[in-house]
Image (tube, rainbow, N blue to C red):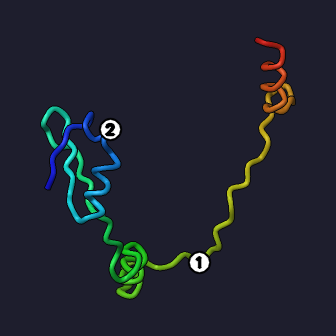
């Protein structure tokens, strides 16, 4: 395991990433206090952990799938009390330099 300060990692990131590719772990420190670790990516065994956890909880009856289909958020245009659309008012204000 390699321990390096932030400034060193910033100046030599490529070389440290090469070492990570080789299987080495790199601990990043701030004033000699470890704050992060870069380790080789090993992927997720057995698929997506979140999906498998949801499937397991559903199978056990802890959670149930939703019954409604989720629709994308619909955004309605906003209007001011004067009846002017908000977007038009903002664009007019910007164009007039106020």
At 14% from the left and 56% from the top, the residue drawn is: 1
Seen in the picture, residue 2 relative to 77 is either above or below; the reply is below
The label shown at residue 10 is 2
Residue under numbered circle 1: 67
Disc nearest the viewer among 2 and 1: 2
At 68% from the left edge and 61% from the top edge, which residue is drawn?
72
N-term mark: 2 or 1: 2
SS type, badge 2: helix
> Percent from the top left, x then y, of residue 66?
55, 75
**Label 1 crowd (10 A; few <14 / some 14-19 / many >=20):** few
Q: Considering only vertical position in the picture, is 94 above or below 17?
A: above
Instruction: Please tell me in which quadrant of the rendered image residue 40 appears.
Output: bottom left
Tell me: 48 left or right of 9. Answer: right
Is the C terminus in the top left, top right, bottom left or bottom right quadrant? top right
- Measured as percent of width and height from the top left, residue 53 is found at 36, 77
Most extreme residue toward the top, as rendered?
98
Q: Is residue 37 above or below residue 31?
A: below
Q: Nearer the viewer, residue 48 or 17?
A: 17
Q: Quadrant of residue 20?
A: bottom left
Residue 65 vs 35, above or below: the answer is: below
* Residue drawn at point x = 35 percent, y = 86 percent: 60
Residue farthest toward the right in the current orientation of the protein: 83
């Amino acid at each position: 395991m390699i321990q390096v300060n932030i400034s060193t990692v910033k100046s030599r990131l490529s070389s440290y990433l090469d070492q990570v590719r080789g299987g080495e772990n790199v601990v990043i420190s701030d004033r000699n206090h470890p704050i992060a670790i870069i380790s080789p990516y090993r992927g997720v065994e057995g698929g997506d952990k979140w999906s498998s956890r949801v499937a397991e909880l559903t199978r056990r009856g802890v959670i149930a799938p939703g019954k409604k289909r989720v629709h994308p958020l619909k955004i309605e245009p906003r209007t001011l009390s004067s009846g002017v659309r908000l977007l038009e008012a903002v664009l007019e204000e910007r164009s007039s330099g106020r």
